Amino acid sequence: MKTFIIPSLLFLIFSSTLFGQVYSDKIVGKKNIALLDSIKEKPYPYTLPIWGEKATKKGYQLPYSAGVSVNYFWQESDLTISNLEVGFNNGPQYNLDQIIRFNSAVATANAVNIRPDIWLFPFLNVYGIFGKGKASTAIDAGIWIPDAENNWSELMSFKTKANFDVTTFGLGLTPTIGIGGGWLALDMNMSWSDSDALEKPAVAFVFGPRLGKTFKFRKPESNIAVWVGAFRVHLNNETTGSLPFSEVVPPNDAQEKVDNGIQKVADTQVKVDDWWNGLSNAQKANPANKAKYETANRALETAGNLLNAVDGALSTVGSSTVQYSLEKKQTEMWNFIIGSQYQYNRHIMLRAEVGFLGTRTQFMTSLQYRFGL
C-alpha cells in the first residue's frame, strides 16, 4: 500500500542562503598604496551604505551598494519524523508512532529564486528572497505489529514519492569583514515556504558561515574568490495539513493489501488473547506479562483502526481526504560547503557552491548584477 505522503510536506526550499561573496575590503600592503590613496581621496558617490564615505576614508574598498541575483538550487537530504497522526475525511486521527517505522525519508528539491539586496552598513548586507520550486519526498516505511511475546513483525511495507510545488519568501542579513582579500561572512535568514498541501507556511532558519580568500587577476576589477564553510538548517517542528486521498493511497492494488492487513491483525489479536487467557492469575499479575499484553493490544487496536479507516476511504476514493499532523527535523542540521565566485567586474559575478558530508547534499549557482544606490 502506498500511503502517508505526509513527509513530502516537510520540505522547505533552502535556496535562501545564496549570498554573493562581495564585501568591504580593507586595502593593505605596500603594492596597494596607490589604490589606497585613490579610495581615500575620491568622494564616495552613493547614499548607501550608511557611513560609506567614512569607511572609504579609512581605506575600505566597498562593493556597489545594491544588487540583484538569480539563483538556482538543488538539494537532497534525510528527514526524521515523529509524533505522526493521521485521519481520514475529517474523522478521528490516530497516532502512528508505535506502529510506523521509517526506513528512509529523503527530500529532494530544485528551485529558482530572485534575491535583491542592499548594503545597509559597510559591514552588513540585507536581502529578500522570492522563489519558486519543485520538491519531492521519497518514503520507505512499514506498519509493524507485535505478538504476545512482544516480537514485532512487519504487517505491510510501502514506498511512495510525493511531488509538489513550493513558493518561498524570506528575509536575511549577512555581517561580513574583509582585510587584504581575506574575508569572513556570517549569512543567516528566515524563510516561509507555502504549498497547497500545507495549512500554513512552513518556516526554516538557515545559518551559513564562510571563510574565504579573493585572488585578483591582471584585468582591472576581475578576481576569483574561494571559500569553505558550513550550512545549518533548522525547520519548525510542527506541520499540519490535508491531502486528497487518491494522492496518498493509489487505489489500483490498495484494497487487496488492506484486506490482507485487516485479516492479519485479527488473527494476531486472537493469538494474543489466547496467550493471555492461558495465563494463571499469578502470571497475569506479573508486570512483564501485563506490559506485553497492553502493548500488543494498543498496537493492534491502532493498526486495526487505521486499516479500517483506509478501507472506508477506499469506497469513496474520489472525494476522500487525509488529514495529518507531525513533527519533523533534519536528520543532521549541519553539513560542509566549498564554493567559488568569478567576478568579471564590479557589476557582474558568477558563483557556484556545493555542500556535502552529513545527510544533506546540495548544489547552488547564481548570477549577480550590482549597481550603486
Image (tube, grey):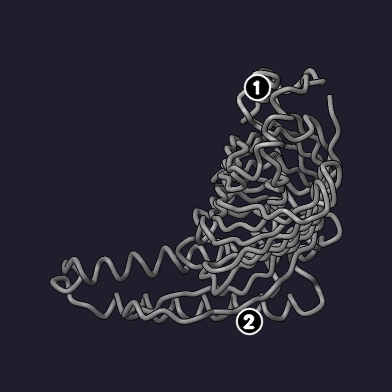
The residue at the point 68 percent across, 25 percent down is: 56
Q: Quadrant of the N terminus?
A: bottom right
The residue at the point 59 percent across, 75 percent down is: 262
Dividing the picture into quadrants, the one containing residue 314 is: bottom right
Mark sitting on residue 57: 1
Circle 2: element type: helix
Closer to the N terminus: mark 2 or mark 1?
Answer: 1
Mark sitting on residue 268: none
Mark 2, residues whose alpha carbon is within 10 Å: few (<14), some, or many (≥20)? some
Residue 112 seen in render: no
- Taking the image as shown, residue 211 lies to the left or right of residue 283, namely right
- Taking the image as shown, residue 290 lies to the left or right of residue 53, namely left
Circle 1: element type: helix
List x then y, in percent, for residue 71.
Answer: 81, 51
List x then y, in percent, for residue 154.
Answer: 51, 80
Looking at the picture, does residue 265 appear above or below residue 299?
Answer: below
Q: Quadrant of the C terminus?
A: top right
Q: Which residue is mark 2?
A: 260
List x then y, in percent, for residue 230.
Answer: 54, 55
